[in-house]
């Protein structure tokens, strides 16, 4: 039996109250409902990509684990979750073959090449996204082109009607006006990633995930707070505007921000062993997300930001082992945060 210091060095310090299977199937359910909302506006293209990715991920999981575990690893839902989260990050009109290949790569390479669930250095879905993004960049052309016209100050006729009603009945008492275009954020839009087209379901999904303690929601909130602050302060400056004039609502409801905050950032592979270390990574991810999107021109820059953070996570974990989990000073450092950041 390893001693206490050894256990601390080797074991992730993550306090999540639900079992792996429970957490994965909740994510699967939320992601699938988001796919359905997107599919209602694209004649089922989102659903076709999701079914292809799901089948491919399950087959890849079976190929990697059937000999040792039979169907046990399929029942924990991790392969299905990886496939459907991947689809949330993909353009809604992507060819199902690309979605299937990305899902197979996510499970067989990103997940299992380092030892399977819990040992992967990157969220498998994010790894699958990077694989498709750089292998078949033209498959993102429609989504990237659509992102430039993602938000219209005028809005659709339905958006104008709804915003007009809300302005007359709610917002006039608050002394403000809701632009018509914001209503269109919650409905099916031009080509884009599935998560952006289904943002209404995604919002309910992340609320459910947070309420039932599926992940470390405090990390998600920290990420959104820092990202929103930067957008408000500097978001308009990046396009030649003024300070403190950035559009926070648009930034939070587009570009895959909510999926990044509540799934990618909250994933243990995106965090360090300690709560302070995880907080540092979440803040860095928020800063990079802002920089890539507003200064680098990458509408889905938050995905690149998390990938870069994942690449540097092992270095921070190594520093943590020396500062927090080694010797008497390490035990004191750990006890100082124990219980506070559950």
Image (cartoon, rainbow, N blue to C red):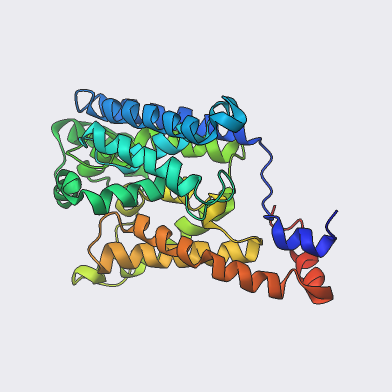
Q: Position of residue 89 (x, y in %)?
A: 33, 43
Q: Is residue 269 left or right of residue 136?
A: right
Q: In the rendered view, tell whether residue 166 sits above or below residue 221.
A: above
Residue drawn at point x = 83 percent, y = 57 percent: 2
Residue drawn at point x = 45 percent, y = 41 percent: 107
Q: Quadrant of residue 204?
A: top left
Residue drawn at point x = 20 percent, y = 35 percent: 93
Report the label total: 0
Q: Position of residue 202 (x, y in %)?
A: 40, 37
Q: Is residue 129 left or right of residue 40?
A: right
Q: Quadrant of residue 10?
A: bottom right
Q: In the rendered view, tell whether residue 34 sits above or below residue 215.
A: above
Q: Position of residue 141 (x, y in %)?
A: 15, 48
Q: Is residue 308 left or right of residue 300?
A: right
Q: Nearer the viewer, residue 185 or 144?
A: 144
Q: Is residue 192 left or right of residue 311?
A: left
Asked whether the viewer can see residue 73, the reply is no
As drawn, which residue projects farthest toward the front? 67
Residue drawn at point x = 55 percent, y = 66 percent: 314
Q: Position of residue 146 (x, y in %)?
A: 16, 46
Asked whether the viewer can see residue 297, the reply is yes
């Amino acid at each position: 039996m390893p001693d206490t210091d050894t256990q601390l060095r080797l074991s992730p310090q993550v306090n999540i109250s639900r079992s792996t299977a429970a957490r994965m199937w909740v994510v699967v359910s939320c992601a699938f409902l988001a796919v359905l909302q997107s599919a209602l506006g694209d004649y089922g293209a989102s659903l076709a990509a999701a079914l292809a990715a799901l089948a491919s991920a399950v087959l890849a999981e079976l190929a990697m684990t059937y000999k040792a575990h039979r169907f046990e690893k399929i029942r924990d839902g991790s392969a299905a979750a990886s496939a459907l989260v991947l689809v949330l990050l993909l353009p809604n009109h992507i060819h199902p073959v690309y979605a299937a290949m990305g899902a197979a790569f996510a499970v067989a390479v990103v997940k299992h090449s380092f030892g399977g669930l819990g040992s992967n250095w990157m969220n498998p879905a994010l790894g699958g996204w990077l694989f498709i993004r750089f292998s078949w960049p033209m498959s993102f052309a429609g989504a990237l082109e659509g992102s430039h016209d993602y938000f219209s100050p005028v809005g659709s006729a339905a958006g104008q009607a709804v915003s007009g009603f809300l302005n007359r009945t709610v917002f006039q008492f608050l002394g403000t006006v809701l632009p018509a275009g914001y209503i269109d954020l919650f409905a099916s839009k031009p080509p884009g990633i599935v998560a952006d087209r289904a943002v209404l379901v995604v919002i309910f999904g992340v609320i459910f995930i947070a309420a039932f303690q599926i992940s470390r929601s405090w990390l998600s909130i920290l990420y959104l707070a820092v990202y929103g602050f930067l957008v408000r302060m500097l978001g308009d400056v990046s396009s030649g505007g003024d300070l403190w004039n950035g559009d926070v609502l648009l930034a939070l409801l587009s570009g895959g921000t909510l999926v990044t905050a509540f799934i990618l950032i909250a994933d243990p592979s995106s965090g360090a062993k300690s709560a302070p270390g995880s907080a540092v990574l979440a803040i860095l991810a928020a800063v990079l997300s802002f920089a890539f999107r507003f200064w680098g021109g990458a509408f889905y820059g938050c995905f690149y930001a998390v990938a870069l953070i994942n690449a540097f996570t092992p270095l921070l974990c190594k520093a943590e082992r020396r500062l927090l989990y080694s010797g008497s000073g390490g035990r004191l450092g750990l006890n100082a945060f124990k219980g506070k950041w559950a």
